[in-house]
Image (cartoon, rainbow, N blue to C red):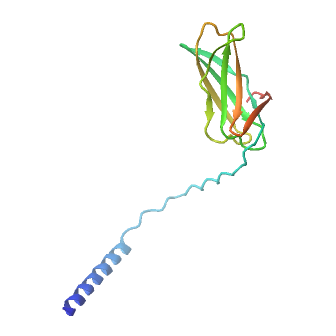
Amino acid sequence: MQGRTRSIVALAGATLFVAAMAFAQAPKPAAPAAAAAPAAPAKLVAPVRGEAEIQYLLPVTKREGKMIVTTIKIKNVASGAIAGLKVDEFWYDKAGEPVTGAQPFRYRKALMPGEVIDVVLRVPTNPKMDRNSYKFEHANGTIKTKGPLPKL
């Protein structure tokens, strides 16, 4: 019985040796000519607590069918990241009573210092609409608007 076990172990060893030699002599795939440099790791920036500052371009408002679409370019001018940016748009009639509002825009990532994003707000039209206003806030406090942005 011991002789049979030795024979099986020897046969298995020989098979592995032959397979390893065949693999070593197999043609290797060509290496990529120029590997792309790895992207720089993202820097962690502490989020702003309390009041953050942004600048924005004057909103561009257009009517598209039965919707009013407002696009605003916003830039973070605070020293830290703005986490959980939220923008609301409210519409009022001539008497100052609320008529309708847009579904809030939420920026899911942190808005890094100096970063510029486009905010798109959609509101159904209403014949009583006269004027609108915007409300900016973030996860850790309020937002102060600091003058309009120069043209980008």
**Closer to the camera, 83 or 71?**
83
Residue 90 drawn above or below residue 3: above
- Judged left or right of residue 44, residue 122 is left
Residue at 49%, 59% (x, y): give it: 32
Q: In this view of the protein, which residue sits in the foreground, 58 or 85?
A: 85
The residue at the far front in this view is 97
Picture residue at 48% right of the left edge, 62% below the top? 31
Q: Residue at x 74, y 42 (%)?
A: 113
Q: Residue furthest right?
A: 147
Picture quadrant of residue 73? top right
Please identify the quadrant where the C terminus is shown: top right
Residue 7's place in the image compared with 45, above or below, is below
Residue 8, position in %: x, y? 23, 85
Q: Quadrant of residue 97?
A: top right
* Total numbered labels placed on residues in the image: 0
Provide residue 78's location: percent of width, then percent of height: 78, 39
* The N terminus - image quarter: bottom left
Q: Residue 67 placed where, x, y %?
A: 56, 16
Near-viewer residue (47 or 76): 47
Left or right: residue 146 compared with residue 71: right
Kindly indicate the quadrant of the structure image that contains residue 96. top right
Residue at the spot x=69%, y=51% of the render? 44
